[in-house]
Amino acid sequence: MSRERKLLFDASLVFVMGLLAAIFGYLIRVILSRQLSLEEFGLFYAVFTFVSFFIVFRDFGLGQALAKFIPQFLVKKEYGKIKASIKFAFFINLFMGMIFATFFIIFSDYLAINYFKNELAKSLLIILSAYFVLYAIYRLIILIFLGFQKSKIYSLNLFFINFFVFIGILIFKKFGVLNPAISYLFAGLMGIIFGFILLFKSFSYFKYVENNSYELKLKLFYYGFPILLASIGATFIGQIDTLLLIKFRTLPEVGIYNVVLPTAMLLITFGSALAMAMLPFVSEYWEKKKFKELSNILLDIYKKSFIIIAPIGLTLFIFSDLILKVLFGESFISGSIALKILCIGSIFFSVAVINNNVLAAIGKPKEVTKLILFAALLNLIINLILIPQYGIIGAALATSASYFVVLILSTYLVNQSVKLKIPILDWIKIFFAGVAFTLLVNLFKNILEMNVLLETTVVLIIGLIGYFLILKIIGIDVFGLFRLMRPDFINHKI
């Protein structure tokens, strides 16, 4: 298998496993919405979001730095530097994890009463503090696998945690609201055990003499710090709305929003998985100065990702009531408007995520950092204005606005850096095909009268047929979507 063919295969594997991880993560919420009351559901995700918010601070971007520099050390056979880098990042992760866990435990009483307004939050905080420490190390391990270019192991680990949480919530359901916290702790423990076993099999850690230096640590920090800032910004955009809902609104609203947001985020998961899958191509072609080939690949990805994302997003938009009712129950239907708003924002951001990964891969993480921090600040300001009065609808508007800003600015930066022509005309064509899809679906929804699930299936099939036919008529190659695994993909012969 050629180098480029192997890259494509590995990238596809990462993409598929990333999607499977998202599916299991979503199923977890579906099951918990049935096991717990709406207030218990909201309480767990309130505490979980609070703890998860601080995970971004755990390693100062050192995990991503390892993923960047380990391949370089391997090429130069500097195994001592690999050992020193792993050891340094591990202890930083462990040290920071213990500090935050101690903080959560010490202030668990105060937070439970004054912030979460529920005494059960104390027990959840204590259990999730242990998970915080384990997950910080686990996340570092899977980024190390990415650095070693162990794509199969890395891709499996992408969905490992969610799979074991899924198993856990079925096993520990008798523990009520503590069930998901115990399940995440169980999954984190399993991840640590298997992660270290696979790591030591992949790299003979104890065989090499540590080549430690101040310059090496500084190099890791210098690369990782801008990524840390970008991660903080991304975390703000993704989680500050929930944290403010906890402060200004009620736990049931928090619960509803933590169903609505992940539903819309399924679109972003597609963009994220695609972005991660294409990262090896972008980095390698940039380093080899194959700018024309890189430009061609990016153009194809932009067009075809939007072709797939648009009908999925519109389906979520049209059937928001039905999705929330069937999957989560009647009590979640009130989140329908917020879901519609977030679906539009998620379509924007799913493309923006690709842009951000391109910029990072060509050595411009600082630009991504500035962009994300600006969007995070905008998101925070709008949230503070809208959430106290409008609740989850205000949160959805703030998040979607920040997503749109990221898309516009990241598209401009990619265009300036790679010198490619953004396929705006093709995007406009796809948009009009999406409008036709929406009209067809709504038309046949009103005409047909049958079982709701059967009716939904039929109208979606009709809508998709119309969508792809219109794309074909207006000159968009939809059949290229199914040829991404062919070798000529690399040579842009789709």
Image (cartoon, rainbow, N blue to C red):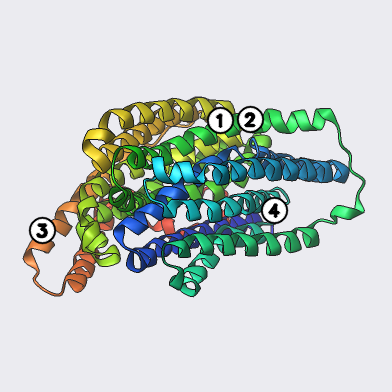
Dot in front, 3 or 1: 1
Residue 485 seen by the camera:
no
Residue at mark 4 to residue at mark 3: CA–CA distance? 50 Å
**Tag 2 near tag 1, CB within 8 Å:** yes
Of the two numbered discs 2 and 3 on the same chain, state the one appearing first in sequence. Answer: 2
Of the two numbered discs 1 and 4 on the same chain, state the one appearing first in sequence. Answer: 4
Q: Position of residue 246 (x, y in %)?
A: 35, 42
Please give left or right for residue 451 compared with residue 276 in the image. left
**Tag 4 near tag 2, CB within 8 Å:** no
Of the two numbered discs 3 and 1 on the same chain, state the one appearing first in sequence. Answer: 1
Of the two numbered discs 4 and 2 on the same chain, state the one appearing first in sequence. Answer: 4
What residue would you read off at disc 2?
A: 225
Dot in front, 4 or 2: 2
Residue at mark 2 to residue at mark 3: CA–CA distance? 52 Å
Q: Quadrant of residue 406?
A: top left
Q: Which mark is residue 443?
A: 3
What residue would you read off at disc 4?
A: 145
Identity, as a three-letter code, of the amino acid under mark 3: Leu
In the image, 304 versus 66, the foreground residue is: 66
What residue would you read off at disc 1?
A: 229
Identity, as a three-letter code, of the amino acid under mark 1: Leu
Within-10-Å neighbours for mark 3: few <14, some 14–19, many 20+: few
Q: Position of residue 67 (x, y in %)?
A: 68, 44
Within-10-Å neighbours for mark 1: few <14, some 14–19, many 20+: many
Within-10-Å neighbours for mark 2: few <14, some 14–19, many 20+: many
